[in-house]
Amino acid sequence: MITGKAKLAGVIGHPVSHSLSPVLHNYWLKHYGIDGAYVPLPVKPDAFETAIRGLQAAGFRGANVTIPHKESAAAIADEVDPLARIAGSVNTLIFREDGKIHGSSTDGMGYVSSLEAEHVSIADIASRGSALLLGAGGAARSIATSLMEHGVSVIFSNRTGERADALARELATAWQSHMKKSAPPLTTIPWDGWETALGEVSLLVNTTSLGMQGGPAPDWKPDLTNAPTHLVVSDIVYVPRETPFLRAAAARGLKTVGGLGMLLHQARPGFRAWFGAEPEVDAATVEHVLAALKQR
């Protein structure tokens, strides 16, 4: 039951109808018996600041931010976590009682937490080799930043090689600026060469939409013949839950981690800040979100 004292938050995007965040957060609100609501907020780019100020005035606790507003969220925040500064985007805003806005990026943290939930040791990843990230977009930036925080060296490979080179340079510069120390090694490899260069890699991450149901290449399945036995293979695509990429890795006996865990774990810090409870990503949570996915 929602009362006049309800705690309020939401997700801002344009469009926002595809977001699973309301499904997840409202499930947790009901599960933990919290008087609150989490709503989708479709906001056009030119109305972002007006919407944020209006939500603050209306008593909202904060909001998640999705495409195309993540850079605008970083700009409007009074305080931004160092890792979000390095990643260059903000996906979680917390409206504080003093009127200030705190911004953070939880995507990378959500990714690392999804690995840990599947019993993948980040320390082992760092000691055995590098993380090879396929793609050079926003997800790659956030995931790389969190891996770097754990001392993992990162290799980028992108179909447009110049974008991978630029990302490696930008992250190294931003890391030095905000962390006041040198970044872990950041290198690149041509897109047509990464399949043959897996010998020194301990973690392989698809941060692109390749393999996504309804996407441009739903049957994408690279050649993993050269993968070492300790390689962990993960995919941020979660529709389908097991992509052809992950099936190919599993067929070789490699440890695999799907994309749904990242989606669920990245939501936890915001829920804790807005609603005052530490949500658990358990089997019931996963099943609830999967059920919602199947209805779309």
Image (tube, rainbow, N blue to C red):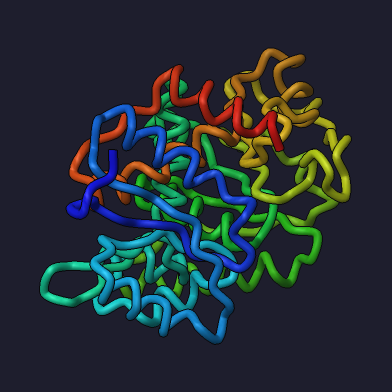
- Left or right: where 247 falls relative to 172: right
Q: Residue at x 68, y 13 (%)?
A: 253
- Left or right: where 160 falls relative to 42: right
**Which quarter of the picture shows residue 14?**
bottom right
Q: Position of residue 175 (x, y in %)?
A: 38, 68
- Please tell me which residue lies in front, 207 or 153: 207
Residue lying furthest left: 98
Q: Residue at x 46, y 68 (%)?
A: 89
Q: Is residue 6 above or below residue 290?
A: below
- Left or right: where 289 falls relative to 116: right
- Please tell me which residue lies in front, 87 or 273: 273
Q: Position of residue 221 (x, y in %)?
A: 84, 33
Q: Position of residue 17 (x, y in %)?
A: 62, 55
- Please tell me which residue lies in front, 145 or 92: 92
Q: Quadrant of the C terminus?
A: top right
- Report the label total: 0
Q: Position of residue 88 (x, y in %)?
A: 46, 71
- Please tell me which residue lies in front, 155 or 111: 111
Q: Residue at x 44, y 25 (%)?
A: 285
Does any portion of residue 232 appear in the rendered image? no
Q: Is residue 9 above or below residue 296?
A: below
Does any portion of residue 219 appear in the rendered image? yes
Q: Is residue 171 above or below residue 48?
A: above
**Which quarter of the picture shows residue 218?**
top right
Q: Quadrant of the N terminus?
A: top left
Q: Residue at x 65, y 49 (%)?
A: 207
